[in-house]
Amino acid sequence: MPIVKVKEGENFESAFRRFRKQCEKAGILSELRRREHYEKPSIRLKKKKIAAEKRAKKTKRLR
């Protein structure tokens, strides 16, 4: 859990910016988006397979 202590004379915006940066480093937002909707394991595997095929096509095209 990211914790930000507001420094003496620091405005809210800069403290909030530091908090957001810490959340981003911790991966909280990406984890939240991933867990937002339940995805069946079969669908997860299907998406993973499609992404792998895309990567393979892209590397083949670049050669």
Image (cartoon, helix red, strand yellow):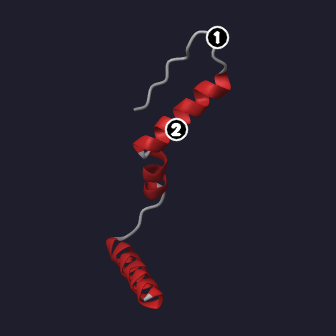
| Residue 23, x across and y down, in percent | 48, 39
Q: Quadrant of residue 35?
A: bottom left
Residue 38 screen position, x and y as percent: 42, 62
Q: Identify the residue at the far front of this view.
A: 63
Q: Regarding mark 1 in the picture, which secondary structure is present there?
A: loop
Q: Is residue 12 above or below residue 30?
A: above
Q: Can you name the residue that lies furthest to the top here?
A: 8
Q: Dot 2 lies on which element? A: helix
Label 2 is placed on what type of residue? Lys
**Residue drawn 47% across and 90% down?**
61
- How many marks the image carries: the answer is 2
Structural crowding at the residue carrying mark 2, measured as other residues with C-alpha within 10 Å and reported as few (<14), some (14–19) or many (≥20): few
Q: Quadrant of the rendered structure where residue 52 is?
A: bottom left
Residue at label 1?
9
Amino acid at the residue labelled 1: Gly
| Nearest the eye: 55 or 19 | 55
Which residue has dot 2 on it?
21
Residue at position x 46%, y 52% in the image: 30
Q: Along the polypeptide, which appears first: circle 1 or circle 2?
A: 1
Q: Quadrant of the N terminus?
A: top left
- Circle number at residue 23: none
Q: Residue at x 55, y 17 (%)?
A: 6
